[in-house]
Amino acid sequence: MISVICKKDYSLRDYQQEAKEKIFSQWDSVNNVLYQMPTGTGKTRLFTSIIRDITLASLQEHVRKSVLIIAHRSELIEQIDESLNKYRIPHGIIAGAFKDRRDLMFPVQVASIQSITHPSNRQFANAFHADFIIIDEAHHATAQSYTKLWNYYPESKKLGVTATPWRMDGSGFRGNFDALILSMPIKEFLGKGWLAPYKYYSVPFDSRIRSEIDSIKEFGIDGDYKTSALEQVVDTGRIRAQLLDSYFEFVKGKKGIIYSISRKHSKHICQQFLNAGIRIADIDSATPANLRKKLVQDFKNGELDIIVNVDIFSEGFDCPDLEFVQLARPTRSLVKYIQQVGRGLRKNGDKQCLILDNVGMYGRFGLPDDDRPWEEYFEGNMESNNKISRINSTKYNIEYGTHRERDLSEGLDEMCLIQQVDVEIKKESPTSIESDDSSAIAESSEVRSSTIYAKYNVVETEEGYYIENIRNNERQFLSELSGRKSISLKLMKNNNSVTGYTIISSFNRNAKPSINDRIIGYIYREGRIIHFASWNRNKVVDIKI
């Protein structure tokens, strides 16, 4: 029984200890286990504790138990090395960038997949009897190099850890792993305070840029968009202007990373931001290792505000005080999307991460904390992969009550607040309460409308009606209450010559107007000035927030 090795580790969080016990228990019956765990929730800490239990059992039983930890990037190897050192676990490293750390006498070895499967290391691979193998970022484990690893060590107990057990071709992981263990959903991690809350801004579902991306028909061997095709659509002055514009509007002065599509795209973004006086640098696979380390350290020390990168920080990058993530790289890969937005969700005090999705990826993949059918992806179901885009295209489409008038005077798709997860868990607003009972509604202090002009909500409180700027949380009084408290506030797009919305106080949640609905007033735009007019138009207020 391998599970007797598992010990209580009081330095782990409850969910990490629970995961460890499940993994050891599965090893009693199968060899190959895959564990799904969201980015930022401590997978390296978890498997380091597993390694410690194995090494302690080895000492107590006076039987050598060898452990091989596999990663595919030097940044991941560095993180694992640091974690093992904290647990005081002696180990060697087999990787090209760590030649001075090679010591084959240790029973614990950290290896890059490239090095351990290279023909020059075959003699060591044959001599090192790995009782346990742990694979970091195991969504890569279907690659040919990992097949070699499985062939080298067919009897070893294996653990793969990943945030995203998903494959582009839908073929699943059954060829490598016998069982999948799931962590709790991201929503629970957010609700319990283990991940940072976030605000998610994006271009609207029906934006020009999304339409242009969806029209791309050139794909690489991995199934993702071809870089050359992406450059034609995304690496343009118009789109780069929007990147800079949304930076200044939402995250000016904050610390963040931008994901680009290519080295050329990175250089163009970097130059545009530098011209605007922003401290920014770019990193890609061609950046020398020493320079990359220096730039990352400068970024962590606050000497740089932004690093723009090409898939370098999708995995193995740990910077808890990251304040925003900007997506300028369209992808067809759920793995890339989740890994990229997940960089900003690592907990750091009361930080709230801002996600700027300038290429509308939420329309394909949903939001970071959406529930996903990981079991189906693990088993291999191409239809499940195909449903991602269809489901989220419907779920996040703009329906009645959420129409947005966008200012396209400069050819830009205006960014909208798609979702906000607050720092503190607050009482739910009436729009999310299942019952339509008006007495239950009365207990809630506020009723909100849908978003107007991608910037404002109309809010009903006990004192009256306010307009709220969702970007800076400022409010401006509009008018007093007119009758009993609403169950919901609805918006109707005006079809007459005055461009704007009619604000309706309603006593039901049906999308269609009801005979009991009441007009509160009108919001409309004249040039760049937005006005509120009362229901009888006796009162007109300029919106100043």
Image: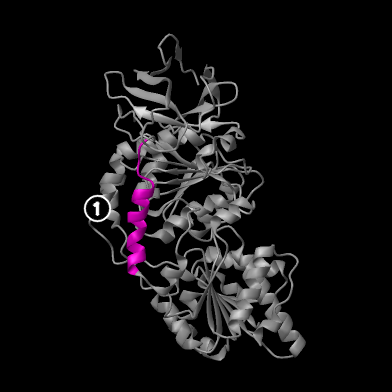
Q: Which residue is mark 1?
A: 216
Residue 348 in percent (x, y) is at: 64, 48
Instruction: From this view, report whether residue 489 is shown above or below residue 64.
Output: above
Instruction: From this view, report whether residue 237 is shown above or below residue 396.
Output: above
User: Which of 36 and 71 lies nearest the eye of the viewer?
Assistant: 36
Q: Is residue 17 left or right of residue 342?
A: right
- Whether residue 90 is visible to the viewer of this picture, yes or no, is no
Task: Give the residue type at disc 1.
Answer: Ile
- Looking at this rendering, what residue extends furthest in the top direction? 538
Residue beneath the point at 61% across and 40% down: 427
Residue 220, quarter of the rendered image? bottom left
Quadrant where the N terminus sits is bottom right
- Whether residue 26 is visible to the viewer of this picture, yes or no, is yes
Residue 22, quarter of the rendered image? bottom right
Residue 497 in percent (x, y) is at: 27, 18
In the image, is residue 388 part of the stretch drawn in magenta? yes
Is the residue marked by circle 1 packed among few (<14), some (14-19), or many (20+) residues within 10 Å? some
In the image, is residue 121 part of the stretch drawn in magenta? no
SS class, disc 1: loop
> Which portion, as a residue range, is magenta?
382-400
Q: Is residue 441 left or right of residue 449?
A: right
Residue 486 in percent (x, y) is at: 51, 29
Instruction: From this view, report whether residue 95 is shown above or below residue 234.
Output: below
Residue beneath the point at 34% across and 49% down: 394
User: Which of 86 and 12 lies nearest the eye of the viewer?
Assistant: 12
What predominant SS class does the magenta segment belong to? helix
Residue 453, quarter of the rendered image? top left
